[in-house]
Amino acid sequence: MTTLLNVKDLRAYYGQVQALHGLSFSLNEGSLTTLLGANGAGKTTTLRAICNMVRSTGAIEFDGKPLNNRSTESIVRFGIAHVPQGRGTFTTMTVEENLQLGAITRKDSAGIVSDIERMYAHFPVLKQRHTQQAGTLSGGEQQMLAVARALMLRPRLMLLDEPSFGLAPLVVRDLFGILGKINREDKVSILVVEQNAQLALELADQAYVIETGRIVMSGNAKDIANNEEIRKSYLGY
Amino acid sequence: MELFTNQVLAGIATGAIYACMALAVVMIYQAIDHLNFAQGEMAMFSTFISWQLMQWGVSYWAAFLITLAFSFVAGIAIERILFKPLAKAPILTNVAGFIALFAIINSSAGLIWDFTIKQYPTPFGSAPFLGSQLISTHQAGMVGVTVLLLLGLYFFFQYTRIGLAMRAAASVPESARLVGINTSWMIALGWGMATAIGSIAGMLIAPVVFLEPNMMGGVLIYGFAAAVLGGLTSPFGAVVGGFLVGIFENLAGTYIPGVGNELKLPIALALIISVLVVKPAGLFGRHIVKRV
C-alpha cells in the first residue's frame, strides 16, 4: 500500500499558543482513517494545518509532494477536499450552485454536469431541493451537501471535520454509511475527525488517538475498538 | 401632470447614475466590508482621462472603452497597493485609507487639469428624445447604457463561473478558499469592476454637471443614499435604490416648497438617516435564513 498523506513532527500555533506538539501520522491510499480525541485535543487544528489555514511547522507530504507554504486554495488543486467544522455551506446560494462551487477548479464542464447528477443519486434529498437556498436546508441535509460539494472536486483525499456534529443519531448512521460507500466505490481516501469514537471506529480501518496535540495511540481501528483499556482511558465509552 | 411625468423621467435618468455609483459602492462593500468614500473621486479621475483622450483627438466611444480598461486596471492596482495590506486592519485604518485616497485623487486631478469647469461631450446629443419634450436624448442614453450594463452584470454574476466564484468569495471567504477559489484576486477583480462601473457613471453624468475635480461629491452622496435605501448587501437593491432616489430627489425639489437646488444634498442625507433608523437593512437587505 502506498502512503498518500504523510505528516511528520507537525507543530501548529494560534498566536503564541501552541496547539500541536510534534504530531506524526500517515494515511494509506484508499484507506479510511480516523483521528479521535477529546475537545481541544487538536483534531481540527490538524486538519486546518494540512490545508495551511493555521500557522504550522513540520513536514506535510501529499503523494510525495510537500504541501508546506502553499496557499489553501492551491492545496485544493492537489485533490484535497476539506469539509470544515460547521460545514462551510454557502448559505445564500442555491444547492446546485454549492455543488458547482465544489467543482470550480475543474475544467471539464461535461464531467461536472454528470457529477452533479451522480451527487443527486447519492443524496436524493439534494435533488428535491436543488433550487432552494442552501441555508434553508436542515443540519443533516447541509452536511450531505457539504460532503457532496467536496466530492465535486473528484478528490483523492477528503478531510472531514466532525461530520456527526449536531446531527440526529439516525442521520449520522446514514451519513457514515454513505462515507463508507464513497470510500469503497469511488476510491476516495478519507481522513475523518470525530468525537463520536464508537461510530468512527466502526467505519474506519485505521485510527489515531490525539491528546493535547500529540498522537498517543495508533493502529487498526478494530484493535483499538476492542481494547478496553484504551477505550476507557482515551475514548470514554 | 406633464410636470410630474417630466420630473419622474428626469429622475429616472439621474437615478441611473446613482444606481451605477451605488452598485460600485455595494460591490466593494460586499468584497471588503467597507464603504469606499473615494468611489466618486475615482470616477471623476477616470472621466478626466476620457476627456484628455478626446482632447488628443480620440473619438468618444474609443475614449470610453480605453477609460473602462484604464479604470479596471487602476481599481485593481489601488486594491493591491493600498487596501490588500489593510485587509486585517481595524475599520478606522481603512476609513483613513479611503479619505487619503479621496484627497490624493482629488488634488492630483486639480493639479493635472486644474479646477476650472470644463464642457464634456455627449455622444447622444441633447435633442428631445423621440420628439418628446419630456426627456432629452442624453438622458435616454444614460438610462440605456445603465440598463445594458446592469443586464451584462446580471448575466456575468448569474451564469459565468468566475461570477459564481466572486459571489462565493464575497459571501463565505473561508469556504471559497476550501473549494480552491483565490479569494484575494476575487476582491481585486471586484475593485476593478467597481471602478469601471463608477467610470461609466462619471462619463455619463459629466455632460450634466460639467467636468471638474469636485463634480462627483453630490453624486456619490446620492449613490450612498441609494445603496443604503436598497440595502448594502444587495446589488439589486442598490440599483432599485438608485432609481428611487433619483425620482425622489426630483419630486422633492419640485413639489416640496423651499427645497430648491440648495437643499437637495441635505435631502439625500436625511434619506440616509431615515432609512438607517427605520429599516437598517434597507429595502432589499438580505435576510439570511440560518439553521443550525
Image (cartoon, rainbow, N blue to C red):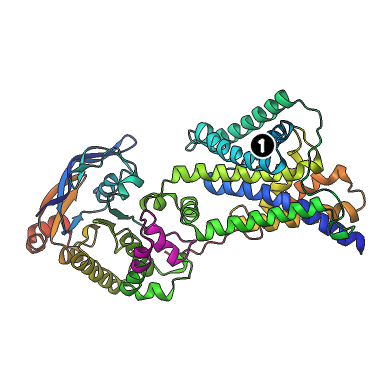
Residue B43 image position (x, y, % from top left): 67, 39
In the structure shown, which secondary structural element does the residue marked by tag 1 occupy? Answer: helix
B93 relative position to B279: left or right:
left
Q: Nearer the viewer, residue B55 or A12?
A: B55
Choose top left, top right, bottom left or bottom right for residue B119. Answer: top right
In the image, what residue occupies the spot 62% across and 31% down?
Answer: B101
Question: Which residue, as the protein is rendered here, is positioned at the far top?
Answer: B111
Q: Nearer the viewer, residue B110 or B131?
A: B131
Amino acid type at mark 1:
Ser
Q: Chain of mark 1?
A: B
Looking at the rendered image, the quarter that the C terminus of chain A falls into is: bottom left
In the image, what residue occupies the spot 39% across and 49% down?
Answer: B177
- Residue span colored magenta: A87-115
Q: Nearer the viewer, residue B65 or A29?
A: B65
Q: Is residue B156 above or below residue B51?
A: below
Q: Nearer the viewer, residue B48 or A128?
A: B48
Looking at the rendered image, the quarter that the N terminus of chain A falls into is: bottom left
Residue B8 image position (x, y, % from top left): 83, 59
Residue A37 image position (x, y, % from top left): 21, 54
**Magenta highlight on residue A91:** yes
Determine if residue B17 is in view.
Answer: yes
In the image, what residue occupies the spot 44% across and 59% down?
Answer: A90
Categorize mark 1 by other alpha carbons within 10 Å: few (<14), some (14-19), many (20+): many
Identify residue for label 1: B46
Residue B228 image position (x, y, % from top left): 67, 52
**Magenta highlight on residue B214:** no
Determine if residue B277 is in view.
Answer: no
B104 relative position to B8: left or right:
left
